[in-house]
Image (cartoon, grey):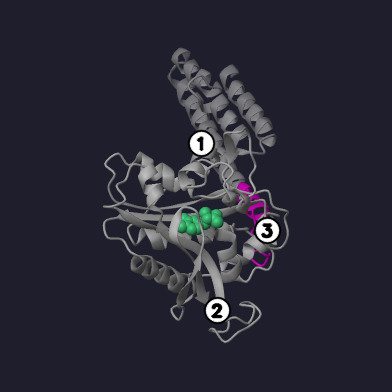
């Protein structure tokens, strides 16, 4: 019978096609080819319509058998292929847990950022604002408003990079004092610190750099006295260098403070007995300070009969060198990661 031959032919074709199936995608294509809506077996069903009863029975039986065979073969092959693919995945994606792990390198804060953050935080805790000023300054703010007119001998204390006659790279963070006082329209109380870079025409060596950082402090209020300055700096020294620290004032000179002082901390290395770090003196100089000069207050619009204040300025590298035992200021700027990494471990004084 012609139609029964057709079934045989389709079976043969299907078995041939099956031989080429080596993955699930091709398997699915075969499935669609034979069992899909427009698949080959659909054509075989259509033949039914034109057959008589007896033929229909025989043909139907054969067709059902073919369908079962096709379904069975496809299911079995699918299972085989799935297993094969899983095995392949398992061998390819095998994880060797004994292999050494990848080293993830972590960064570390630069010691300068670290110490500036630490100092800022301790002043913030005492109610100070942290401000910044421009590194390119006017001669007016860097010198004149700070009581250093042109040709004043105090200009020799800070050898300056001039850009024009009026513009310069600031030699100190003290112009931030001027900017703060001038900007305060109410001429009221002020409590700020200003960390930032400064520049001087110095020859670089182990303790000098043409570029370094300072932190400026300024407090202006009614009845501010030297005692407030002393108390503030004592807290600063203890927090940074340890609770046993004491400070002492030595008379000094800065044009913008009167009286002016230099502040020493008793040596944290030998507790004041004398060692190489404090050059056997028992004391280490940490900063300059003083009571804001009435003339500076007046120039900035403050009534110096009503308002008084103190100011201080410190070299940040010097503080960091003392605290961390760094022998050469140039280490801060040579970008050797081995240097930077060491400061990961250091914690604050207290
Ligand atoms: N500006 C000074 C310097 O660079 C440091 C200084 C001293 C700042 C005394 C002050 C101060 O505010 O009161 O040498």
Residue 182 % position (x, y): 37, 40
Work out whether mark 1 precedes mark 3 in sequence or the reverse, and give the earlier one: 1
- In the figure, 324 relative to 279: above or below? above
Q: Are marks 2 and 1 in contact (CB under 8 Å)?
A: no
- In the figure, 341 relative to 5: above or below? below
Q: CA distance from mark 2 to mark 3?
A: 22 Å
**Which residue is depicted at the point 69% across and 60% down?**
331
**Which residue is depicted at the point 67% across and 61% down?**
329
State the mark number for residue 267.
Answer: 2
Q: Is residue 251 magenta?
A: no
| Region in magenta | 84-100
Q: Which residue is mark 1?
A: 68
- Compare residues 328 and 165 and report the one nearer the observer: 165
Q: Which residue is mark 3?
A: 208
Relative side of 129 to 13, left or right: left
State the mark number for residue 128.
Answer: none
Q: Is residue 99 magenta?
A: yes
């Amino acid at each position: 019978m012609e139609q029964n031959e057709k079934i045989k032919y389709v079976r043969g074709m299907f078995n041939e096609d099956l031989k080429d199936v080596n993955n699930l995608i091709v398997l699915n294509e075969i499935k669609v080819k034979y069992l899909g809506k427009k698949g080959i077996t659909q054509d075989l069903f259509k033949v039914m319509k034109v057959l008589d009863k007896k033929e229909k029975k025989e043909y139907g039986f054969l067709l059902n058998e073919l369908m079962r065979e096709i379904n069975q073969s496809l299911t079995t092959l699918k299972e085989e292929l799935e297993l094969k693919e899983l095995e392949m995945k398992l061998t390819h994606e095998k994880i060797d847990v004994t292999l050494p792990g990848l080293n993830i390198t972590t960064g570390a804060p630069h010691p300068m950022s670290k110490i500036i953050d630490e100092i800022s935080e301790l002043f913030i805790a005492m109610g100070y604002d942290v401000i910044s000023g421009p590194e390119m300054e006017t001669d007016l703010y860097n010198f004149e408003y700070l009581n250093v007119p042109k040709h004043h001998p105090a200009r020799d204390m800070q050898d300056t990079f001039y850009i024009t006659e009026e513009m310069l790279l600031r030699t100190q963070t003290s112009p931030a004092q001027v900017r703060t006082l001038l900007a305060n329209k109410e001429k009221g109380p002020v409590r700020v610190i200003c960390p930032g870079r400064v520049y001087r025409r110095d020859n670089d060596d182990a303790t000098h750099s043409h570029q370094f950082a300072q932190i400026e402090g300024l407090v202006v209020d009614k009845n501010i006295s030297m005692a407030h300055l002393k108390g503030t700096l004592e807290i600063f020294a203890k927090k940074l260098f340890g609770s046993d620290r004491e400070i002492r004032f030595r008379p000094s000179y800065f044009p913008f403070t009167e009286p002016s002082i230099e502040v020493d901390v008793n040596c944290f290395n030998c507790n004041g007995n004398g060692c190489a770090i404090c050059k056997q003196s028992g004391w280490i100089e940490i900063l300059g300070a003083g009571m804001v000069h009435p003339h500076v207050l007046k120039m900035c619009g403050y009534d110096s009969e009503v308002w008084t204040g103190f100011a201080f300025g410190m070299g940040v590298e010097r503080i960091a060198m003392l605290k961390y035992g760094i022998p050469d200021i140039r280490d801060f700027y040579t970008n050797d990661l081995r240097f930077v990494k060491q400061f990961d471990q250091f914690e604050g004084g207290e």
